[in-house]
Image (tube, grey):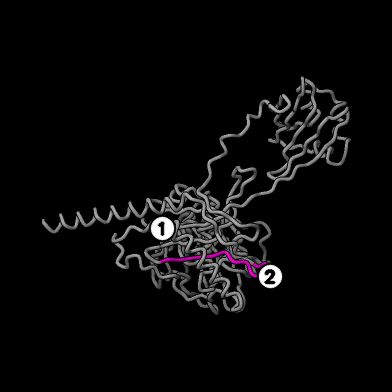
C-alpha cells in the first residue's frame, strides 16, 4: 500500500517536471528562431521558424478601396460563360470588352476564362475603370482605364517560404494525429512516404509513437497558400528513432537521407497498396478457402477495397499482363535479372500498362479486385528471387544507396543543425510509460 502511494507521488513529481519543461520549451517555440542559412535546407533565403500562422486580421475590406473611393463588383464565371455574357449580365457595353481584349496580348488573356474564376469590376464614381482577374496563385491581370485608354498589366507574386514546425503523438491514427498537429494531408502523406521504407504505416504504428516535422509553409502576401516539402523529420516508432533530412547536392539532385548518409528510399516499396492490412501471410501450408485444400501461400494478401490503386514496388519492366488461372488478372514485373514481383486478382489494369513497358517505383499499375480464385477483393503479391518465391516481409532486399562520400560532411552538419533545432522545439517525451529503453533513441 505504502509503496503504491510512493510511486504515485513519484509519478506526480515527474508530471510537474514534464509540465515545467514543456512550458519552457513552449516559450522557446513561440519566439521565431533563425535557422542558419544552410544551402540545402533553405536554398532561397534565410528562414525563420514560426508556429502555423493565423491569417492577417488587418486585411482591408475588399468592398471599398478607401484610397480613391473605388467600388468593386465581383462576378464569378459560370459553366458555359463567356466574357461577353458576363459583361451583359452586369450591364457593361460589348464595346468596352473589345477595347480591353484588343488592347494587347495580355488583354486577350481576359477572354480565356474558366468556370470558378472571379472577375473584379472596379468603378470610380459609378464609371467602370478597372478589371481584375486572378489567373493563378501567383499571377493576376488588371486592366485600367486612364485618359480614355485601357492598359493591361500583369502582377506576379512571390511565394515566400517559411519554415514551420509540427509535432504530434499518435493516439488513434497517423492522420488524426497529423491533423491535430496542424499538418495538411499532403504533408502527412509526404511523411509516410519518406519513412514508408522503414516503418510499415499499416502494421507498425502504435499508440504513443511520436513525430516531429520541419517543413516549408508557402505564403503569398502573408497569407498561407499551402505546404511545400518536408525539410527534416523524426519519427519514433515503438521506441525506435528514425530520422530523415532533405539534402540537395551541388548537382541539384535532391533526396531524403538518414543522418548516416543512407537514402531513405529503398530498392523495393514495403507494400504495393497504401494503408491496407495483411489478410494472409506467406506460409508453407495454409487452408485455401476456395480450393478447400491445404496449400502453401507463396505471397502476401493485402485486403483493400475494390479499385484501390496497386503500385509497382520497384522500377522494372512489365513481363506479363493478362489472365492466368487462380491469379485472375495479373501483372508480372521484372526488376533487373534477379527479381520479379507479381500482382494478382486485379479488377483492371492501369492505363498504358502492357508487356515490355517500363514502370517506376510507386507507379499505379492496376487496381484491387477479386478476379481468379479470390473470396473477396484483395491483392495477392509475390516476390520471386531467381525464380523462387520468397517472403517479401522478411527477405533481405537490396540496400539503399548511400550518399557520395564527398557530400557526407555537409549532410552531417545539416543534420546536426536541423535536429538541434527540432530538439529545442520538441517537448520532452513522456518518460517511463511502457518503454523499457526509456528515451535512449537509436538513430536508424
Ligand atoms: Zn494470396
* Residue drawn at (16%, 57%) of the image: 6
* Residue drawn at (42%, 51%) of the image: 26
Q: Label for residue 210?
A: 1
Crowding at label 1, few (<14), some or many (≥20) Cα neighbours within 10 Å?
many
* Residue drawn at (70%, 33%) of the image: 118
Q: Residue 75 appears at what percent x and percent y? A: 71, 28
Nearer to me, 348 or 168: 168
Residue 23 versus residue 204 in the image, above or below: above
Magenta stretch in the rendered image:
241-253
* Residue drawn at (53%, 76%) of the image: 399
Q: Quadrant of the C terminus?
A: bottom left
* Residue 130 location, quadrant: top right
Nearer to me, 290 or 127: 127
Q: Residue 162 appears at what percent x and percent y? A: 58, 52
Say whether residue 289 is left or right of residue 328.
Answer: left
Q: Quadrant of the N terminus?
A: bottom left
**Residue ID for mark 2:** 251
The local secondary structure at tag 1 comes to strand
Q: Mostly what secondary structure, the magenta segment? A: strand
Q: Is residue 374 magenta?
A: no
Amino acid at each position: 500500500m505504502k509503496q503504491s502511494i510512493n510511486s504515485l507521488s513519484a509519478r506526480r513529481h515527474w508530471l510537474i517536471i514534464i509540465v515545467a519543461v514543456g512550458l519552457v520549451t513552449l516559450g522557446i517555440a513561440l519566439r521565431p528562431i533563425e535557422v542558419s542559412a544552410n544551402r540545402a535546407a533553405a536554398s532561397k533565403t534565410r528562414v525563420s521558424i514560426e508556429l502555423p500562422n493565423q491569417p492577417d486580421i488587418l486585411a482591408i475590406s475588399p468592398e471599398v478601396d478607401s484610397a480613391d473611393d473605388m467600388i468593386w463588383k465581383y462576378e464569378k464565371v459560370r459553366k458555359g460563360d463567356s466574357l461577353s455574357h458576363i459583361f451583359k449580365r452586369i450591364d457593361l457595353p460589348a464595346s468596352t470588352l473589345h477595347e480591353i481584349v484588343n488592347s494587347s496580348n495580355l488583354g486577350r488573356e481576359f477572354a480565356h476564362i474558366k468556370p470558378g474564376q472571379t472577375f473584379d469590376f472596379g468603378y470610380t464614381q459609378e464609371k467602370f475603370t478597372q478589371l481584375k482577374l486572378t489567373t493563378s496563385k501567383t499571377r493576376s491581370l488588371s486592366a485600367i482605364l486612364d485618359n480614355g485608354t485601357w492598359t493591361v498589366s500583369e502582377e506576379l507574386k512571390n511565394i515566400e517560404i517559411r519554415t514551420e514546425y509540427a509535432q504530434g503523438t499518435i493516439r488513434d491514427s497517423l492522420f488524426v494525429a497529423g491533423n491535430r498537429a496542424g499538418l495538411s494531408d499532403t504533408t502527412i502523406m509526404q511523411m509516410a512516404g519518406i519513412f514508408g521504407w522503414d516503418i510499415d504505416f499499416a502494421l507498425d504504428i502504435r499508440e504513443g509513437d511520436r513525430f516531429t516535422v520541419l517543413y516549408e509553409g508557402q505564403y503569398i502576401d502573408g497569407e498561407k497558400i499551402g505546404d511545400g516539402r518536408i525539410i527534416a523529420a523524426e519519427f519514433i516508432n515503438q521506441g525506435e528513432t528514425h530520422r530523415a533530412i532533405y539534402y540537395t547536392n551541388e548537382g541539384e539532385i535532391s533526396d531524403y537521407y538518414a543522418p548516416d548518409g543512407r537514402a531513405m528510399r529503398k530498392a523495393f516499396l514495403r507494400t504495393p497498396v497504401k494503408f491496407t492490412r495483411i489478410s494472409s501471410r506467406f506460409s508453407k501450408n495454409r487452408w485455401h478457402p476456395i480450393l478447400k485444400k491445404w496449400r502453401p501461400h507463396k505471397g502476401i494478401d493485402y485486403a483493400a477495397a475494390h479499385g484501390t490503386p496497386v503500385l509497382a514496388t520497384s522500377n522494372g519492366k512489365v513481363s506479363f499482363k493478362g489472365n492466368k488461372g487462380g491469379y485472375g488478372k495479373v501483372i508480372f514485373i521484372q526488376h533487373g535479372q534477379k527479381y520479379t514481383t507479381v500482382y494478382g486478382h486485379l479488377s483492371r489494369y492501369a492505363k498504358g500498362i502492357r508487356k515490355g513497358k517500363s514502370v517506376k517505383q510507386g507507379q499505379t499499375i492496376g487496381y484491387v479486385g477479386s478476379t481468379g480464385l479470390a473470396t473477396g477483393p484483395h491483392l495477392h503479391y509475390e516476390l520471386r528471387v531467381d525464380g523462387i518465391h520468397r517472403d517479401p516481409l522478411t527477405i533481405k532486399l537490396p540496400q539503399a544507396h548511400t550518399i557520395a562520400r564527398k557530400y557526407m560532411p555537409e549532410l552531417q552538419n545539416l543534420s546536426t543543425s536541423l535536429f538541434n533545432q527540432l530538439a529545442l522545439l520538441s517537448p520532452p517525451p513522456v518518460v517511463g510509460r511502457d518503454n523499457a529503453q526509456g528515451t535512449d533513441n537509436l538513430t536508424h
